[in-house]
Image: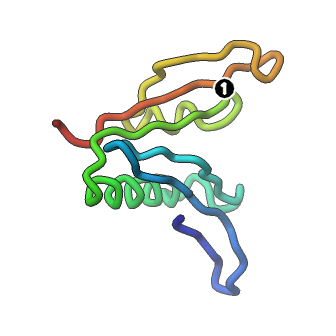
Amino acid sequence: MIAVSDAAGTWRGDITAEVYWDWLEIQDFWLDESYRGQGLGRALLAQMEGLAIERDAAKALLSTFAFQARTFYERWGYEVVGEVEDYPPGSSLFTMVKQLCPR
């Protein structure tokens, strides 16, 4: 886990993940609304991907909803490989994958 806190030590977000089977699996990634749009999300994602590469991960995997961060992940090289429609009702859950380094 990589956490983000403000100057007062208040938690403002984090990214949690595991590396196994040569994959990085991002499990949670959230930033307080006031911290978005400043490049911090990209920096956290890049840092987590770098740590995973150091642990020999070749690919990354995550899930996100249509109303969440799909376009953010696509901007940084993640591709949709699966979709569960109407989950939750009226939306979709996407599984996304990124090649971190060639094998």
Observer-nearest of 14 and 24: 24
Taking the spot 51% from the left edge, 46% from the top edge, the residue there is 26
Could you tell me the amino acid type at mark 1?
Ala
Observer-nearest of 4 and 98: 98
Whether residue 67 sits left or right of residue 22 in the image: it is right
Taking the spot 34% from the left edge, 55% from the top edge, the residue there is 52
Spot occupied by residue 60 in the image (x, y as percentages of width and height): 40, 40
Q: How is the image coloured?
A: rainbow
Whether residue 15 sits left or right of residue 8 in the image: it is left
Mark 1 Cα within 10 Å, few/some/many (few <14, many 20+)? Answer: some
Find the residue positioned furthest to the front: 21
Q: Is residue 65 above or below residue 48?
A: above
**Secondary structure type for disc 1:** loop
Spot occupied by residue 30 in the image (x, y as percentages of width and height): 64, 54
Spot occupied by residue 95 in the image (x, y as percentages of width and height): 54, 27
Residue 63 is drawn in which quadrant?
top right
Q: In this view, does 8 lie above or below 68?
A: below
Find the residue positioned furthest to the left: 103
Observer-nearest of 82 and 13: 82
Mark 1 = which residue? 66
